[in-house]
Amino acid sequence: MIFIGTLIGFIRSIWKGLKDPEFRALFFLVLVLLLCGTLFYMKVEKWNLLDAIYFCVTTLTTIGFGDPHPITPIGKIFTIFYVILGISILLGFIEKIARGLTTRKNENKT
């Protein structure tokens, strides 16, 4: 039950955040980042859609299970830059969501 409440709060924060231009920009960048990474890995590493998205999400969230992983030299080089750029963008996005959740929680207390 706690999970559902947290999920609802997360979705509300995203919905509310879409009114903020900075949040919208970060949201758009995250979507573009995931799309570009997915398409790259599908094309270069010959992964299917699910494996490519899975790799992008686990890499950018720093979970990194290690399965799958790039095999080609260009895939490895792309991943180096993808991680450096992607983690920065994703952290900014997560920070905006956390700030929205904190603000909403504080508004409910008053």
Image: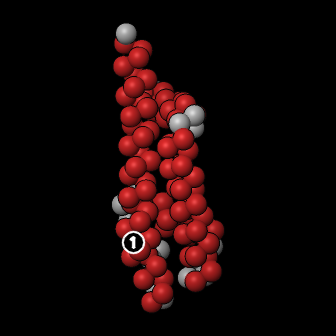
Relative image position of residue 39 (x, y in whole percent): 62, 72
Residue 65 vs residue 18: left or right?
A: left
Q: Residue at x 50, y 50 (%)?
A: 26
Colour scheme of the rendered structure? secondary structure
Q: Where is 26 relative to 49, above or below?
A: above
Is residue 39 in view from this perspective? Answer: yes
Q: How many marks?
A: 1
Q: Is residue 81 left or right of residue 47?
A: left
Residue 11 visible in the displayed image: no
| Residue at which label 1 appears | 66
Q: Depth check: give the residue in front, 90 or 20.
A: 20
The residue lying furthest to the front in this view is 21
Image quadrant containing the C terminus: top left
Residue located at (39% from left, 76% from top): 80
Q: Nearer the viewer, residue 32 or 61?
A: 32
Q: Compared with residue 23, is residue 2 higher up or lower down, i.e. above or below?
A: above
When asked about the image quadrant of residue 32, the answer is bottom right
Q: Residues within 10 Å of mark 1 (few under 14, many from 20)?
A: few
Residue situated furthest bottom in the rendering? 73
Q: List x then y, in percent, for residue 79.
A: 43, 75
54 relative to 99, above or below: below
Could you tell me the amino acid type at mark 1? Gly
Residue in the picture at 43% in, 23% down: 104
Q: Position of residue 102 (x, y in %)?
A: 37, 28
Q: Residue 72, how many percent across, how many down?
A: 48, 88
Q: Give the quadrant of residue 69.
A: bottom left
Q: Give the image quarter of residue 40.
A: bottom right
Q: Nearer the viewer, residue 29 or 6?
A: 29
